[in-house]
Amino acid sequence: MYLVAITQLASAWPEGLKASARTLSSTPYDLRLALAGGLPAIVATSDDAARAAAMAQALRACGHQVLDLDSQRLLSGAQIPALRSFQLETQAIIVDLIPTHDAQGAITQYRIPFASIEAIFPTAYELRSTQTTEHQHKKFSPGRAMLSSGMAARKTITTTTTSRSTEKVQACFVFLHPRCALVIRNEHIDYRALGERMAHSQGANYALLLDLLRRAAPQALFDDSLLSRKLPDRLSQVVFSRLPGQSSEQQSGEAGVLLLAQLALLGARGSRV
């Protein structure tokens, strides 16, 4: 699937709204809706590379900064290892990484100079979980009692109870390059390398680690706008098309913010993929 995403709007916006919508064979309302969540924003998708490139070029002619890219060439969550533990040096961080979504996977260690960090994206997304519980109980059945001469006077009744909950999940993507990244999740991390600065709560240690990275890598793009982004419907469609069969909601939510982070990084680079 090919994506067309606006990373920066023209200075004449919203006066050029109608012209921009026409380039997408869309309506001003639909384009406003696609942009309502913020930038970068996916405004069109196509299975035809040439059509996606033509739409992107038309939007550039309207003054927007635009990416047109093949979604299959972007990193998926399964390709990004997760931080398990770390050690801090003056000029670098030594990281122990595990395969993402596999806490029991083999650990690999790398030394990452702070100067090599290109971008840091703290993100957050909602994890919605549904739990269904079945309850069984016996109930007197006059009909069964008559038919069985009292031998089977009760029948089993099964009732189902469904409960739903929403949890805010935090994950930070650290890019060394658009094709090389790691994820720091606010869970399952050994923070002992923080030493005396180590706090009593996991959340405080997570925030401290991100602050340390930001200060140690001042050249890196730091974008925390994804902390408040919601996953729009168009982005959800792209995300689910990139995930294998029975993917969890956590994977799909994280894949959404990862996709936005990559669009933001490529937009800052002025890249086309």
Image (cartoon, rainbow, N blue to C red):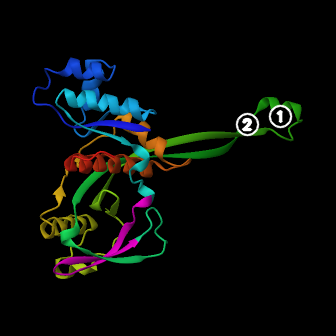
Amino acid type, callout 1: Ala
At x 40%, y 43%, the residue is 70
Q: Which residue is mark 1?
A: 145
Question: x%, y% of residue 108?
Answer: 41, 76
Q: Is residue 176 magenta?
A: no
At x 17%, y 81%, the residue is 196
Specify the quadrant of the image occupied by residue 82. Answer: bottom left
Indicate the secondary structure of the residue bearing disc 2.
strand
Residue 106 vs residue 2, the one in the foreground: 2
Q: Specify the label residue 161 is tagged with.
A: none
Q: Is residue 86 magenta?
A: yes
Q: Do the residues under discs 1 and 2 have CB atoms within 8 angstroms?
A: yes
Residue 60 vs residue 190, the one in the foreground: 60
Specify the quadrant of the image occupied by residue 214. Answer: bottom left
Q: Which residue is mark 2?
A: 140
Drawn side of residue 70 relative to residue 139, left or right: left
Q: Is residue 71 above or below residue 13?
A: below
Q: Is residue 52 above or below residue 253?
A: above
Drawn side of residue 165 relative to residue 213, left or right: right
Dominant SS of magenta comes to strand
- Which stretch appears magenta? 79-97
Amino acid type, callout 2: Phe
Residue 105 vs residue 161, the one in the foreground: 105
